[in-house]
Amino acid sequence: MSELQRLKGLLPPELQSWVFVESSTAVDPPLITCEEIGRDEVEVQVDLVRWEQFALDQRNLLFWHEVGRIQNDTIPRDGWEMAALAIGLGGAVGELWVQDGVLLLLALGLSGFAGYRLYQKNNNEKRLQESIEADERSIALATRFGYTLPNAYKSLGSALKTLVEQTPKKRQRSKYEARLQALRRSAARAKAKAQASTPAPGTVKSSRQSENVFG
């Protein structure tokens, strides 16, 4: 089984008919990303050269992070905003020439709305929050596929640490660091919740295991 086929098998059954996994063909691609390729179709693209440098459990959690983005409906899409912005600005210039006040206001309104949507779409804080939420999804998916909660946190945490070490660009590295800090806080909450619950008879071993949620 090839790595791409293996990853395809890690998709939840409800996604397998419309989510595809392919090797990235871009120049200097990201390690893994996903994008909409058609109506109700999404493709996860993997840089297999770099991908093979990660441990199997790390790969699984990074892949489930992308699956989490798909489930949360936060994947990049070719939007209408740039086209609308160009049309609005072009219309505004034209209406200045013919001096039609109503159409000028409409053109400026279209430009303003498109610009606002672009700002929202590219807002760094919003994108970081979406990544953190996808990390939470990846933990849930890992437990769905048989991982214990501590191992899921450890695998994703070690993958993010590796990405921090391998990323030379400060801005991108800071995003991985922020995700890692958020993951640690999430693990601490999971640990506290496990410690607060009263273990039933015969579950002492699993309770002790839960105390080390994050390595």
Image (cartoon, rainbow, N blue to C red):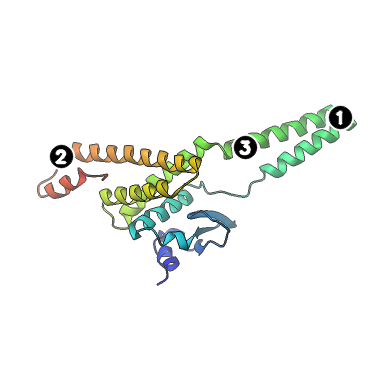
**Kind of residue indicated by mark 3:** Arg
**Kind of residue indicated by mark 2:** Thr
Q: Residues within 10 Å of mark 1 (few under 14, many from 20)?
A: few
- The x, y position of residue 157, in whole percent, is 34, 47
Badge 3 vs badge 2, beta-carbon distance below 8 Å: no
According to the picture, the residue beneath numbered tag 3 turns out to be: 117
Q: Residues within 10 Å of mark 2 (few under 14, many from 20)?
A: few
Q: Which mark is residue 135?
A: none
At horizontal 29% and vertical 57% (from top left) the residue drawn is: 146
Query: How far apart, in angstroms, are the residues tagged by discs 1 and 2?
Result: 73 Å
At horizontal 59% and vertical 49% (from top left) the residue drawn is: 77
According to the picture, the residue beneath numbered tag 2 turns out to be: 198
At horizontal 35% and vertical 59% (from top left) the residue drawn is: 55
According to the picture, the residue beneath numbered tag 1 turns out to be: 100
Q: Earlier in the sequence, mark 3 or mark 2?
A: 3
Q: Give the position of the C terminus as an image quadrant.
A: top left
